[in-house]
Image (tube, rainbow, N blue to C red):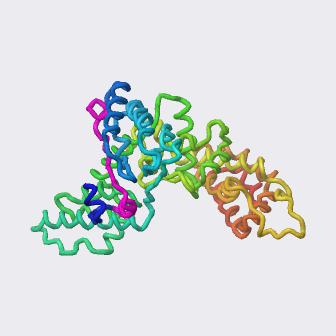
Amino acid sequence: MSPKEATNGGHQDIGPSTRHLLSQDWICHSCHYREEPKHADIATSTSVSEARHRSSFRNRTFYPKLVIVFDALDECGTAEERDTSWRCWHMTLPIFPSHSHHHHEPCRERYSNVFESRQHILTYELDITSTGNSDDILSYFRHRMSLIRTKNKHLKLAADWPGERVFHHLVERASGLFVWASTASQFINGHDPRKRLDVILNGGGLSGAEAALDALYKTALKSAGNWNDEDFVADFRNIMGVILLAREPLSSTAIDALLNLSEDRPSIHTISILGCVLQQSPTVRVLHPSFPDFLMMQDRCARDIWFFDRSTYHHHLALRCLDRMDAVLKQNMCNMTLTVDITTESLPEDVSYSCTFWIYHICAIEDYIMSIVERLRLFLFRHLLHWFEAMSILRRSGDTISYLNRLLDWTSVSHCPAFTPWCRLL
């Protein structure tokens, strides 16, 4: 788009986020570095790269306000090769006028401070949960289905096929991700579009579409970090295990407390590197529900360090919950008096989660059951009354009986004869 088109409002075909920026009369120069670093845009020599970039920007006439769009950064070679280009940008940024505002969807890798260290740079993070984003995906589906109808005119698809209800269901399944919408549309565009659409709507495997998503996830993970680094792999597995199996999404601070992580290496250090598949705030969660499926099916993720067995990580999370409650629960843990209104009291996020969901995680354990039975017995002996108090503070006292009944059922089904009679006393 030319500057004249942008300022004259010629942006009816772009998304609402970009449209919002352009509506401020900001000129948009879209800088795409999608080529591999061996091409001219990103030279292998840092000195050559620096010279080329600095020369390019010195000879450019700047508008009063400038918007730079970085697209497909994860496709620019390896992490090491991207480092070279980022060093060039770090050298180039001082050339921009100090009154410029550079908006970008933040790169969550370790060198994102290239932007964040500059006070005149504002970050604009695209919200995939926004109504505008959903409307864009809806428009995309309508466009792709119209092309499929035109291509398959002998199949006598209705003029509005597949219909509004189906369109909105597809948007819901996309969960805000255009990559899912694109992959699903390509899958539907087969010999029998009706049949393929039914496969997606019924929640079945997407075959070709699923394979395409798997390839994207593998590419994203491969470029995220150094998988030969034992520390990175250990943090990835511990933290991702919590994110995948947590009954409710947790903040990075709560994850730190639950895993008892050092302040010198908090979970956000690893989570930020995985920004292509994780949402960071206000809670940490996967961007699309297909990602947990990918990681929990070994034949799909195809690497042991990426595979997460549900029972194993429920076991890990149950132990972390018991550890956290062991450390915090005690009589009158909030130092309340008769004059204090209990509704004003609360517990930290990680303690609240542990008190609410420890039984859920224990009941999901299928293997190595006896390894947790003795730990469970000790916890109930020491902290059962304290747990009742905590659930009262959380205003969930009414759930305690059903939770304990579920625990009793689990001990019976899991064949824990030594523990079941003791548990019945509850």
Relative image position of residue 80 (x, y in whole percent): 41, 30
Relative image position of residue 138 (x, y in whole percent): 32, 67
Judge whether residue 54 is colored magenta. Answer: no
| Of the pair 181 and 125, the residue shown nearer to us | 125
Occupied quadrant, residue 43: top left
Q: Quadrant of the C terminus?
A: bottom right
Relative image position of residue 342 (x, y in whole percent): 80, 68
Whether residue 53 sits left or right of residue 368 in the image: it is left
Q: How many marks?
A: 0
Judge whether residue 21 is colored magenta. Answer: yes
Occupied quadrant, residue 156: bottom left
Relative image position of residue 395 (x, y in whole percent): 73, 68
Residue furthest to the left: 154
State the residue at coordinates (31%, 42%).
60
Q: Which residues are magenta?
A: 15-42
Whether residue 371 sits left or right of residue 137 in the image: it is right
Q: Do we see residue 140 in this rendering? A: no
| Of the pair 61 and 386, the residue shown nearer to us | 61
Against 168, residue 40 (above or below) is: above
Occupied quadrant, residue 261: top right
Against 417, residue 138 (above or below) is: below
Q: Quadrant of the N terminus?
A: bottom left
| Of the pair 351 and 198, the residue shown nearer to us | 351
